[in-house]
């Protein structure tokens, strides 16, 4: 008997079931199919202006910084300002997300390179799929458009978020992801990011910049 | 198990921790930080109680259908190009991981924080085979340098002060300037970040635990604040997830319910910084991520807990709220419990996993104050289950003879009302006489353990019932 | 009309020691002795918690007894909450000069939800000034046999409790559970503290002319 079989036999013995009861399978498959929502906090059930205000409040509450721009074409200027104001080199790495590629980076003095991070980049930029107003959480999907390494290796992580992509709650993120990749499917990685990296492991004092980014800057595009 | 338990010497372990004094001092931080922050986070969410109930129901439903959800989960992992391995016990889990590492010729593996890794004693096993495991969670890294086990399930180095950590860094990081300044906590963090960054980039295999496994999508979920778990799993060629079978939940919505109570209960955050959903190896068009994705599913006695009075324990999501609020844990710290799961959750789980004959003290070393249950996000009746262990011990005669005798003696009287009343009245009067009106005893025969530390207040001369009868007679 | 029928112990020590059979025997005696009354009032939170929360659990597997246990549980109250929640008493006629602090006993607080009730009534006692105890909801370290079996740990916990009590500067510590009272009084006494320890009912019933716990004869 394989270990797999041993474990399943033990579970079924404990539960007093055989495993082939149709009613149990129906219950399970129905739940997987329906994905009932449960309790969704009222906090973020707001109009778009309210959601945006809540998102910014929550993100800043976990030490992210937030800038608002009116149009995608304003993003490079804002990024250049951010790097300059923080005395960072005018260099940036990004994936090949068409939304980012279409921005006028040439209008800035930024040295923009593309592709995954090898650990030497000081600053990286990715485009959020969506974000959650309830907790100030960004949702970023993996892929060549936004390589996951860019979310973790650079010291400074900049994320572009379209205000129109912002949703109220975690459940609404899943609705979007399913629309994109299909029910029951997922990209290789979905990253929920709520503020910059931190650790409380030394005497319970919270310090930013443990292993991931030391700073998280969110550029919200309102137009 | 290869982590040798010392739970049988719980009393000595506890006394040592108390005598040493540094543990209760270090744990003052836990009490101030975790407890206050949790209250704030809970108060800020009106739906918290409803979410607790919802989370409890999700896990109960899943456990009742665990075989089916595991099958669905396994199929989805395979569909996404991953591999699932089942391990009946620790030894099998260790060997599965080692085999995977050997097949890809791994020399170093980075590790995200995983209590299952501690449970199966993975590091020692890899080391013995010439593979270097590197813990990357800051707290785990520190205790790995010290050759210790975690003293807390989410804050492994909580028992240490920054001076102790500085000493360890100076002892181990000998390639760095011996005159460097490490007085600030931040400089310790920066040093660990620099040392570990090289390890992340060089590792052949990354091993993480999982907070959840999702049957709907075949995803594993890790919840961290440092980002070390993510660097562990996206940089090496191979990602191995080690998780116990009860980590499975049905859907993405179900995970979302539990996430809302997890971070709030653990650290008082609304969300931890990184919640990461991983599904299979890198896709054809990906430019990063692991080429292989393995999940090792460990049973190690859990399937046998289903359908017993200990099934509720399988709802545990390892948030550590129970130990953060435990008056006993506060005094003795995690190591005194003698195995890897400390505090109230450990006092229930450890006897299940290593045997109550080895861990009999743990369910007894509780005042049953109930604070653990009151803060448990999954509403696990921890005191009730500790009591069930006491029942099993009582039935199996594992209780010390003195405790049994004392209890039997008391029960003999208690079952006979008139005799019991008479006895207590006589005893009360007798004790008053013995106390010679001083109002307290500094030592009493048979109660040495009490009077060693505190006085025994003399009860009133008559029992309440005797007084009542006298009053009623007037 | 109030009656005190012949009674024994609620069985909690046996229950918590894993001796379920003795606990059931005792619980059955209690049920038989008390089920004919409209209300059962208990002066100690842990006994109240035992009857109200654990009796139904003890007889889960016996439908007949389970119903009887649940009925008794539903009409069992801890003394102070009985006064406020059942009788609707919001103030008492009593005098007690000086500052008091209050320890929330674990069973009363977490099994019976007693927190605001004693504070409400104590607030109406003439001359009494309440001062809150730091960590008043944290266990005193008694835990029945725990205090004897794990003496050094219990001592650490009660030392902290007693230290917090002393830090309030209160003249009197009140609580509603005999186990906690005995434990904290014993520690305060050993520490040489002047704080007197009383059952909250003593103050509410205006009976504080009697010696405090562990202080009997000391004043004469």
Image (spheres, rainbow, N blue to C red):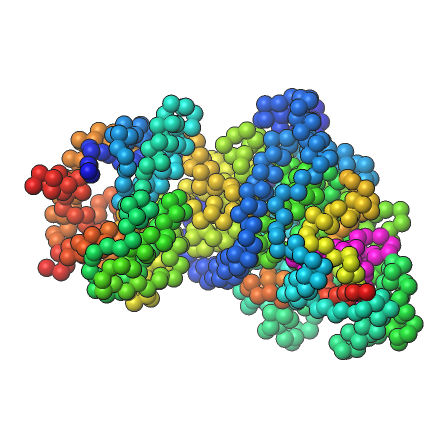
Q: Is residue A51 left or right of residue B16?
A: right
Residue C95 in percent (x, y) is at 20, 60
Q: Is residue A127 magenta?
A: yes
Residue B333 in percent (x, y) is at 48, 54
For the residue pair A52 and B336, the one nearer the viewer reads as A52
Quadrant in which the N terminus of chain B is drawn: top right
Q: Is residue A134 left or right of residue C63?
A: right
Q: Residue at x 61, y 38 (%)?
A: B58
Quarter assignment of residue A137: bottom right
Q: Magenta segment, which residues?
A: A122-149
Q: Residue at x 72, y 54 (%)?
A: A167
Quarter assignment of residue C11: top left
Quarter assignment of residue C169: bottom left
Q: Is residue B56 magenta?
A: no
Q: Is residue B183 left or right of residue B406?
A: right
Q: Residue at x 78, y 40 (%)?
A: A183
Query: Furthest-left residue in view?
Result: B474
Q: Residue at x 73, y 38 (%)?
A: B216
Residue C1 in percent (x, y) is at 19, 38
Residue B128 in percent (x, y) is at 69, 46
For the residue pair C78 and B467, the one nearer the viewer reads as C78
Query: Furthest-front residue in view?
Result: A47
């Amino acid at each position: 008997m394989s270990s797999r079989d041993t474990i399943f036999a033990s579970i079924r013995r404990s539960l007093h079931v055989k495993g082939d009861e149709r009613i149990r399978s129906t219950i399970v498959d129905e739940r997987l199919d329906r994905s009932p929502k449960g309790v969704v906090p009222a906090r973020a059930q707001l109009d778009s202006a309210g959601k945006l205000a809540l998102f910014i409040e929550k993100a800043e509450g976990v030490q992210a910084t937030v800038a608002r721009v009116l149009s995608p074409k304003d993003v490079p200027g804002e990024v250049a300002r951010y790097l300059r104001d923080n005395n960072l080199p005018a260099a940036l790495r990004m994936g090949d997300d068409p939304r980012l590629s279409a921005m006028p980076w040439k209008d800035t003095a930024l040295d923009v390179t593309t592709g995954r991070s090898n650990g030497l980049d000081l600053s990286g930029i990715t485009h959020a799929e969506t974000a959650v107003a309830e907790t100030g959480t960004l949702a970023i999907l993996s892929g060549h458009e936004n390589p996951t390494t860019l979310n973790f290796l650079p010291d400074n992580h900049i994320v572009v978020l379209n205000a129109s992509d912002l949703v109220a709650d975690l459940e609404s993120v899943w609705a979007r992801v399913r629309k994109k990749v299909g029910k029951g499917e997922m990209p290789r990685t979905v990253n929920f990011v709520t503020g910059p990296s931190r650790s409380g492991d030394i005497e319970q004092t919270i310090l930013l910049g443990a292993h991931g980014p030391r700073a998280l800057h969110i550029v919200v595009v309102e137009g | 198990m290869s982590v040798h338990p010392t739970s049988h010497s719980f009393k000595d372990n506890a006394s040592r921790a108390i005598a040493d004094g540094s543990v209760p001092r270090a744990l003052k931080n836990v009490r101030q930080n975790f407890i206050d922050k949790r209250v704030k986070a809970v108060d800020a969410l009106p739906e918290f109680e409803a979410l607790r109930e919802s989370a409890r129901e999700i896990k109960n439903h899943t456990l009742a259908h665990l075989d089916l959800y595991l099958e669905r989960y396994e199929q989805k992992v395979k569909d996404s190009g991953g591999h699932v391995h089942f391990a009946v016990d620790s030894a099998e889990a260790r060997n599965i991981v080692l085999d995977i590492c050997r097949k890809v010729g791994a020399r170093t593996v980075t590790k995200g924080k995983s209590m299952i890794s501690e449970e199966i004693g993975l590091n020692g096993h890899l080391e013995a085979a010439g593979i270097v495991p590197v813990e990357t969670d800051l707290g785990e890294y520190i205790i790995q340098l010290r050759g210790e086990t975690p003293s807390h399930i989410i804050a492994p180095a909580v028992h240490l002060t920054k001076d102790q950590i500085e000493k360890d860094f100076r002892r181990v990081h000998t390639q760095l300037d011996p005159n460097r300044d490490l007085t600030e906590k931040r400089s310790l963090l920066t040093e660990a970040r620099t040392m570990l960054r090289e390890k992340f980039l060089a590792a052949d295999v990354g091993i993480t635990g999982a907070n959840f496994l999702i049957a709907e999508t075949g995803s594993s979920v890790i919840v961290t604040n440092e980002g070390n778990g993510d660097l562990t799993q996206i940089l090496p060629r191979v990602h191995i997830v080690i998780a116990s079978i009860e980590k499975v939940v049905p859907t993405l919505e179900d995970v979302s319910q539990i996430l809302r109570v997890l971070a709030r209960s653990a650290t008082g955050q609304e969300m931890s910084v990184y919640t990461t959903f991983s599904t299979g190896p890198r896709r054809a068009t990906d430019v990063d991520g692991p080429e292989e994705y393995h999940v090792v599913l460990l049973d190690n006695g859990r399937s046998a807990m289903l359908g017993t009075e200990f099934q509720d324990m399988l709802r545990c999501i390892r948030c550590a709220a129970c130990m953060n609020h435990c008056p006993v844990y506060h005094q003795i710290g995690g190591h005194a419990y003698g195995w890897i799961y400390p505090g109230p959750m450990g006092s229930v789980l450890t006897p299940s996993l290593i045997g109550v004959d080895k861990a009999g003290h743990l369910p007894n070393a509780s005042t049953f104050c109930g604070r653990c249950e009151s803060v448990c996000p999954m509403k696990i009746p921890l005191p009730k289950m500790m009591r069930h262990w006491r029942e099993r011990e009582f039935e199996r005669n594992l209780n010390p003879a003195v405790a049994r005798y004392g209890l039997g003696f008391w029960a003999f009287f208690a079952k006979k009302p008139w005799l019991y009343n008479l006895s207590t009245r006589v005893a009360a009067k007798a004790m008053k006489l013995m106390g010679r009106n001083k109002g307290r005893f500094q030592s009493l025969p048979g109660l040495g353990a009490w009077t060693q530390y505190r006085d025994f207040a003399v009860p009133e001369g008559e029992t309440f019932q005797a007084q009542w009868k006298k009053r009623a007679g007037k | 009309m109030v009656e005190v029928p012949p009674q024994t112990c609620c069985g909690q020590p046996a229950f918590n020691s894993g001796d379920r059979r003795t606990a059931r025997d005792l619980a059955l005696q209690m049920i038989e002795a008390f089920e004919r009354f409209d209300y059962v009032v208990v002066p100690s939170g842990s006994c109240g918690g035992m009857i109200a929360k654990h009796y139904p659990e003890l007889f889960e597997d016996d439908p007949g007894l389970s119903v009887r246990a649940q009925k008794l549980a539903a009409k069992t109250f801890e003394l102070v909450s009985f006064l406020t929640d059942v009788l609707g008493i919001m103030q008492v006629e009593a005098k007690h000069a000086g500052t008091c602090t209050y320890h929330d006993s674990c069973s009363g607080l977490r099994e019976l939800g007693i927190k605001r009730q004693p504070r409400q009534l104590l607030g109406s006692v003439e001359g009494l000034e309440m001062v809150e105890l730091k960590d008043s909801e944290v266990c005193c370290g008694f835990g029945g046999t725990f205090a004897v079996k794990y003496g050094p740990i219990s001592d650490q916990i009660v030392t902290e409790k007693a230290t917090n009590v002393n830090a309030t500067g209160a003249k009197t510590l009140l609580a509603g559970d005999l186990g906690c009272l005995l434990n904290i009084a014993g520690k305060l006494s050993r520490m040489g503290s002047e704080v007197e320890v009383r059952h909250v009912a003593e103050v509410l019933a205006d009976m504080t002319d009697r010696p405090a716990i562990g202080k009997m004869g000391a004043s004469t």
